[in-house]
Image (cartoon, rainbow, N blue to C red):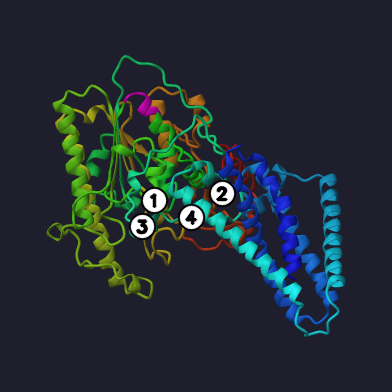
Amino acid sequence: MGFAWFFNILLGALIGSAWLESAPTGGFASTVFLAVALLSSIATLASIPALALWLVAWIVPSRRLVGWLQAAVWTVFQLLLFADTRIYALFRYHFNGMVWNLLTTPGGRDTFELGAPTVALLAAGAVGLFALELAVWNRWLSARPALEDGAPRSVRARRIWATGCIAVVAIVLLDKGIYAAADLGRDRRITVLSRLFPLYQRFTVKRLARNWFGMKLEERAAVDLPGEGLLLRYPIEAPALAPTAKKRPNVLILVIDSLRADMLAAETMPEITRFARTGRRFEDHLSGGNATRFGIFALIYGIHGTYWQPVYAEHSPPVLVTTLQGLGYDMKVLSTPTMNFPEFRSTAWVTIEDKVEDKLPGTSKHDCDEEVARRFEAWMDARAARGAAEPFFCFALLDAPHGNYAWPREETRFEPYAEQVDFLLMSGAPSAEDVERVFNSYRNAVHFADDVAGRMLMAMRKHGELDDTLVVITGDHGEEFLEHGYFGHTSNFTPEQVHVPFVLAGPGIPAGVETRPTSHVDLVPTLLEALGADRAARPSYTHGINLLEPPAQRQRVIASWEEVALWVEGGILRIPLEGHKGLIEGYDYAWERLADEDGLIERQGAVVARLALECRSFLR
């Protein structure tokens, strides 16, 4: 069995070398990483069938029968590897549930149909592989010492097995060590290459370096950004903005963590509710994710959250930020939670790290949220004192309504409330009263965050900046309170977890209520077109549309850690991003499996095919 494993690692590496065809040329370190990562990835993947075959060999007494079984298993393994190399060549991502849907539903097959010659060639390849695997097995059997069944292996065989295992372990450790060092040092020439390999397990040591060795990650050298990406091509072309003699509008993006749509009401958010009447309120707006990482990513980048990993690997900044920098905007980021995790310092703010303030004094989250307002007020005062002529951009993230909901107890509005969230209780069978107390704590935190947001609006009004500012107020995702059996967020794609409030106000924004469907990815094209970008250029830098002209119906994409959801007419398609995570599933908006699940998946085959193309549109 061991010989078959080693042989198939080498054969798999030969087949998998096709993944390297799109790898950019690099130096010695990149070349070494590609070689060891290829062998390490194949060895890791091959360990799964190898372990299964070892178990079979213990149970099945006939070595010949085992030989036929192992030949069949390894043939399937190598064919799947080959199929993945072709999928990657076409889509720039690996076999996943979305690809399976394309291959198994009529709508998908209409887009990507395999011809008869291709099927015949694959069949011939399968027969050839099976014959090779069987021949290797028989050759190994004939080369073994003639020992009785149950006799110990020869010393030579043991040495070969031990040497092979040590070599494989050494290669895996070298692979992970090179990646961890590159990630710590932000060597994107290496980290970006990891996505060439399916199911690559990224090993990082940033937390260890910070917590055990006192390394200050924010003091690392700035990322060296080349003119274009290595495997990423975002943007395909940067939007050109028409020159203007007028001062361009300021931009304030204010995100309140875990803010679900039904919180935008006079009872819970009086300040923002009043402010929303001066601008446009979007009633059917979805975040780009059910977690902070993907919600903010979609909001600031204007592309699907499926691009998080390649963007992070290449430390690629958002076109919104680089465009505003190029126009001379005064940049500022204020955040209660750290921008190190999620890694926004290495993504969204990589070109303005020195403008990020996220280590705020305070003993609680609500103290830090108040500090966000104080620093924003001080910044407005300082700009007024020096007579700042340049427009400003500010991104602010308030955290009071996230996790253990925080607010000053003397400002409590909703009772009874829970002093602390008992997550063990919430994961069991809490009573309606238990849930109500936790929900009231959340509402108190939201009310407090609304007051902080009101202070920031007042600071702009005080200095005459508010009417000249494009103000965006929204949430990164929602929050569920067991309406569908889940608590918090990241667990499903129901309205409670992904439907967020969205308010847009400022010069050129008509007041009113928008009921047509919109999404976080729509903000970037809306802002850039308000600044003079050509709408025809959208496909070169965004998946979004202009918020001021949404269609009556559309499909919207929500990303999560290992899956993506499509909100479509008739339900929600849950699509795993890795093949081993299962196939596409269909749910209603209450997160119940649809009785006509297959029907919905089949009807939306073309939509999934379009998503597949969008998920590779900004990849080389």
Q: Which residue is mark 1?
A: 342
* Three-letter amino acid code of the residue under disc 3: Glu
Question: Residue 566 vs residue 150: left or right?
Answer: left
**Residue 218 at x, y = what percent?**
33, 45
* Three-letter amino acid code of the residue under disc 1: Pro
Q: Is residue 357 above or below residue 65?
A: above
Question: Residue 60 vs residue 41: left or right?
Answer: right
Crowd around label 3: few <14 · some 14–19 · many ≥20 (10 Å): many
The earlier-in-sequence mark between 2 and 3 is 2
| Numbered mark located on residue 479 in the image | 3
In the picture, which quadrant includes the C terminus? top right
The earlier-in-sequence mark between 4 and 1 is 1
Between circles 2 and 4, the one closer to the viewer is 2
| Numbered mark located on residue 561 in the image | 4
The earlier-in-sequence mark between 2 and 1 is 2
Query: Which one is nearer the viewer's eye here, 236 or 54?
Result: 54
Secondary structure, magenta segment, majority class: helix
Q: Which residue is mark 2?
A: 194
The earlier-in-sequence mark between 1 and 3 is 1
Query: Which one is nearer the viewer's eye here, 3 or 526?
Result: 3
Question: Which region is colored magenta?
Answer: 323-328
Crowd around label 2: few <14 · some 14–19 · many ≥20 (10 Å): many
| Residue ID at (78%, 84%) | 151
**Residue 245 at x, y = what percent?**
31, 14
Q: Is residue 113 above or below residue 45?
A: above
User: Is residue 582 in sight in this rendering?
Assistant: no
Between circles 4 and 3, the one closer to the viewer is 4
